[in-house]
Image (spheres, rainbow, N blue to C red):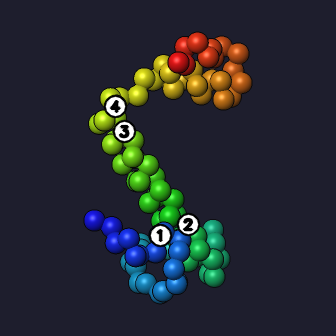
Amino acid sequence: MADDSAPAPGEGPVRPMSVSLHEGTIAALKQRTGRRGMSAYVEGLIQRELERERLRELIAAAEAEHGPVDQRAVDAKRALLRGDATGSADTAA
């Protein structure tokens, strides 16, 4: 159960934390971010992963309550959003 008084991801004071990473991962991270940008880069990665996990949980809960998503309807809505002429609003009901 989540603590309602705890800050949300990306909020609250910044604290140092020690993590262990493979040397190759560290080298790639340093190359991509420079020495001073590593914390912000890792923070962003972790926040995005937490968001993805939460989204997967919400989808699973919705599918448990309402059943699986109709893939044809999803495809039709996606086509409409992309402006694909083959997508039809009638098939996305």
- Where residue 68 appears, as percent x and y from the top left, is 35, 29
Amino acid, disc 1: Ala
Q: Is residue 90 above or below residue 17?
A: above
Q: Give the mark, 2 or 3, whose residue is nearer the N terminus.
A: 2
Label 2 crowd bin: few (<14), some (14–19), many (20+), radius 10 Å: some
Q: Residue at x 53, y 71 (%)?
A: 10
Query: Disc 4, disc 2: CB below 8 Å?
Result: no
Label 1 crowd bin: few (<14), some (14–19), many (20+), radius 10 Å: few
Assign a secondary structure to mark 1: loop
Q: Which residue is mark 2?
A: 44
- Residue 79 visible in this rendered orientation of the protein: yes
Q: Nearer the viewer, residue 23 or 21?
A: 21
Q: Residue at x 31, y 35 (%)?
A: 65
Rendered image: mark on residue 67: none
Label 4 crowd bin: few (<14), some (14–19), many (20+), radius 10 Å: few
Q: Nearer the viewer, residue 13 or 39?
A: 13
Q: Which residue is mark 4?
A: 66
- Where residue 24 appears, as percent x and y from the top left, is 48, 70
Q: Residue at x 63, y 68 (%)?
A: 32
Q: Which residue is mark 3?
A: 62
Q: Is residue 35 above or below residue 65?
A: below
Assign a secondary structure to mark 4: helix
